[in-house]
């Protein structure tokens, strides 16, 4: 897998409805995981989307999630740039560059789903997610 750059949109409880709507327009293969599938203890969010990804025949990739409790959700400010792939060296270099002068909200480290993941806002105010697939 090469690295990819794509939009990541946060929703307030209706991510499943939104991604299924986008799939009805663009077609493609949808993968969807809920907070409950990853052991979230709060039953109120168990069926909400932790991560969904739509891969379309046109080559588009769209990722979405529901905003968990305790995190802010402001329509208009709910899109992040996602950088993901399997080339850990390339993606860690990008992380280092993007984080210079920025603000790290989630350090780049191994997560419960097995990938290395981090979130930051760069020095220009742009939010980024970096996910290294299957990182050791």
Image (cartoon, helix red, strand yellow):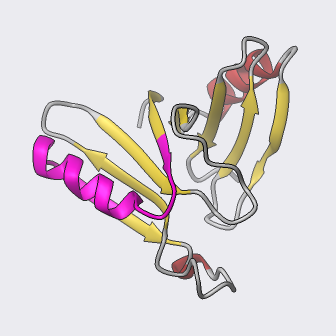
Residue 52: give x, y in percent of width and height. 40, 57
Q: Residue at x 74, y 18 (%)?
A: 98
Q: In front here: 136 or 27?
A: 27
Task: Please state if 69 lies on the left or on the right of 5 as rendered.
Answer: right
Residue 33: give x, y in percent of width and height. 44, 69
Residue 10: give x, y in percent of width and height. 51, 47
Q: Is residue 53 above or below residue 34?
A: above
Q: Residue at x 35, y 40 (%)?
A: 62
Quarter of the image where the N terminus is located = top left
Q: In this view, does 27 lie above or below 81?
A: below
Q: Does the magenta stretch include residue 25?
A: yes
Q: Residue at x 26, y 44 (%)?
A: 55
Residue 35: give x, y in percent of width and height. 56, 73
Task: Please state if 58 lies on the left or on the right of 87 as rendered.
Answer: left
Task: Please state if 63 lies on the left or on the right of 20 as rendered.
Answer: right
Magenta range is 9-31
Q: Is residue 105 above or below residue 128?
A: below
Q: Does the magenta stretch include residue 12?
A: yes
The image shows a total of numbered marks equal to 0
Q: In front here: 14 or 51?
A: 14
Q: In this view, does 110 lie above or below 27?
A: below
Task: Please state if 59 lies on the left or on the right of 90 as rendered.
Answer: left
Q: Which residue is drawn at 76% across and 15% down?
A: 97
């Amino acid at each position: 897998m090469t690295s990819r750059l794509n939009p990541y949109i946060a929703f307030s409880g209706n991510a499943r409805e939104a991604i299924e709507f986008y799939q009805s327009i663009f077609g493609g293969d949808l993968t969807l995981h809920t907070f409950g599938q990853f052991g979230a203890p709060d039953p109120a969010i168990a069926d909400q989307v932790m991560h969904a990804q739509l891969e379309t025949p046109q080559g588009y990739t769209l990722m979405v999630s529901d905003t968990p409790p305790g995190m802010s959700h402001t329509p208009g400010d709910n899109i992040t740039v996602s950088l993901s792939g399997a080339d850990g060296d390339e993606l860690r270099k990008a992380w280092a560059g993007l984080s210079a002068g920025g603000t790290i909200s989630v350090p780049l480290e191994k997560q419960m789903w097995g990938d290395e993941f981090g979130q930051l806002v760069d020095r220009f105010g742009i939010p980024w997610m970096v996910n290294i697939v299957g990182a050791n």
